[in-house]
Image (cartoon, grey):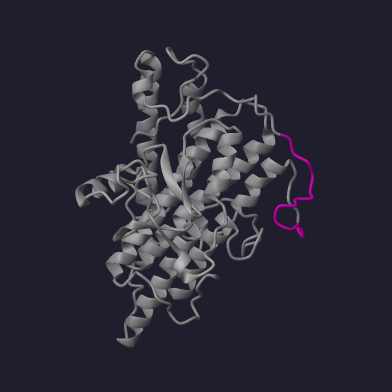
């Protein structure tokens, strides 16, 4: 299945109102952000001066996730929505779950390791449905440990589950189903944009009613890994969302995206294969220079550490609380950037890499009562 384009007639879709489109795009913001804490935890667990190849790969991907977050925000603003990264359910409760093919998988906060790399490959794995019927998968509640008989929980429990952030990728409005992959999630949004814009144009209107001043334009975001797309209508909205899917999963064109950047899946695969990709390579067969990974040169951060795990170490606990406040302020700055103050985004991206100093106060400290494990950021916002 290939991604819908702006020039194609709108295909069948589940998005029938502008409010539903806004909710899908909010979920898109949530999905893009959900990868940042795991990537940043792995990045800053690397011991200084070692694992330079892994450092570079993870750092580039983290910055590009910020680009994806910005692209989705631009689309949401363009169709009259309001990005809100400060909602109580925005930051997941780790470990959280994301779709990968027919199964869910757990996304943990943990140090750089073979297990972390395997998770990163699953997050970015290209998974396109072979048929329309394959695009959605029934949620296996028993496998998620939600109910004993495998039936969907009652509405109040379902709402609590979504708000807790422990399961992502559910179909908005139909949470007994989930998407086969993140790529199929964006395919659904593109179909919804095409459908709603077609309906609006029949009435001489458009769904792109947002204030252009709320767009983050390229001068406010420099990543070195793709450009911000200013969303002014259908074509640019589809281009922005297609770039998100391509740059993450390499979904619609292979190893490189439409801006000639290596997709995230293949960036991470380089660490698994021990060799860089270069132009002309086939998927799974990088032929560029070798790279090395030292799995031992990593601080042993306790996976999915919580504030409760730090109670025997008061100074570390205080540092973890300060980090969470810092991260909440970081998200607030990004939110302001997406709501009419785009100049704040330049500072926010810089702040993302100042987190290293604050994380070092955690990841270099052994935990009392947890032999062999160090503290780490909890991201309990």
Q: Residue at x 38, y 81 (%)?
A: 198
Name the quarter where the N terminus is drawn: bottom right
- From the viewer's perspective, is residue 381 above or below residue 225? above
Up-down relation of residue 264 to residue 19 (above or below): above
Relative placement, left or right, of 194 versus 39 is left
Q: Nearer the viewer, residue 127 or 31?
A: 127
Q: Quadrant of the C terminus?
A: top left
Start-end of magenta stretch = 279-292
Q: Is residue 49 above or below residue 101?
A: above
The kind of secondary structure the magenta stretch mainly shows is loop
Quadrant in the rendering for residue 178: bottom left
Nearer to the camera, 36 or 309: 309
Residue 179 can be seen, yes or no: yes
Res. 347 in view:
no
Residue at image coords 36%, 49%: 335
Image coordinates of residue 254 in percent, x first then y, are 65, 61
Q: Position of residue 6 (x, y in %)?
A: 48, 77
Hey, which residue is sitting farthest front in the picture?
A: 149
Of 7 and 286, which appears nearest the observer? 286
Q: Is residue 283 toward the left or the right of residue 72 in the image? A: right
**x, y percent for residue 47:** 61, 25
In magenta segment, residue 281: yes
Where residue 243 appears, as percent x and y from the top left, is 54, 62
């Amino acid at each position: 299945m290939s991604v819908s384009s702006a020039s194609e007639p709108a295909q069948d879709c589940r998005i029938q109102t502008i409010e539903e489109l806004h909710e899908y795009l909010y979920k898109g913001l949530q999905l893009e952000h959900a990868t940042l804490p795991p990537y940043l935890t792995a990045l800053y667990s690397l011991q200084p001066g070692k694992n330079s190849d892994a450092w570079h790969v993870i750092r580039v991907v983290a910055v590009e996730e910020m680009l994806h977050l910005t692209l989705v925000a631009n689309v949401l603003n363009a169709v009259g929505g309001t990005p809100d990264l400060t909602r109580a359910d925005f930051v997941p409760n780790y470990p959280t779950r994301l779709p990968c093919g027919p199964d869910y998988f757990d996304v943990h906060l943990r140090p750089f390791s073979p297990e972390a790399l395997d998770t990163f490959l699953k997050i970015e794995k290209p998974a396109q449905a072979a048929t329309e019927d394959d695009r959605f998968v029934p949620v296996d509640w028993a496998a998620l440990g939600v109910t004993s008989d495998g039936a969907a929980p009652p509405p109040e429990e379902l709402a609590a589950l979504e708000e807790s952030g422990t399961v992502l990728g559910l179909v908005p409005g139909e949470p007994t189903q989930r998407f086969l992959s993140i790529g199929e999630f964006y395919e659904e949004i593109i179909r919804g944009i095409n459908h709603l814009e077609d309906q609006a144009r029949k009435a001489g209107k458009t769904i792109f009613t947002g204030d252009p001043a709320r767009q983050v334009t390229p001068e406010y975001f420099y990543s070195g890994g793709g450009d911000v797309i200013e969303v002014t209508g259908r074509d640019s909205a589809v281009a922005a969302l297609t770039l998100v899917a391509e740059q993450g999963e390499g979904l619609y064109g292979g190893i490189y995206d439409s801006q000639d950047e290596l997709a995230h899946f293949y960036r991470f695969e380089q660490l698994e294969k021990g060799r860089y990709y270069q132009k002309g390579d086939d998927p799974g067969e990088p032929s560029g220079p070798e790279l090395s990974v030292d799995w031992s040169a990593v601080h042993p951060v306790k996976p999915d550490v919580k504030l409760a795990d730090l109670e025997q170490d008061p100074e570390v606990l205080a540092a973890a609380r300060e980090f969470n406040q810092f991260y909440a302020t970081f998200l607030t700055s990004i939110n302001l950037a997406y709501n009419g103050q785009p100049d704040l985004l330049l500072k926010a991206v810089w702040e993302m890499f100042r987190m290293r100093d604050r994380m070092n106060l955690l990841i270099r400290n052994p935990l009392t009562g947890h032999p062999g494990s160090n503290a780490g950021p909890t991201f309990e916002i």
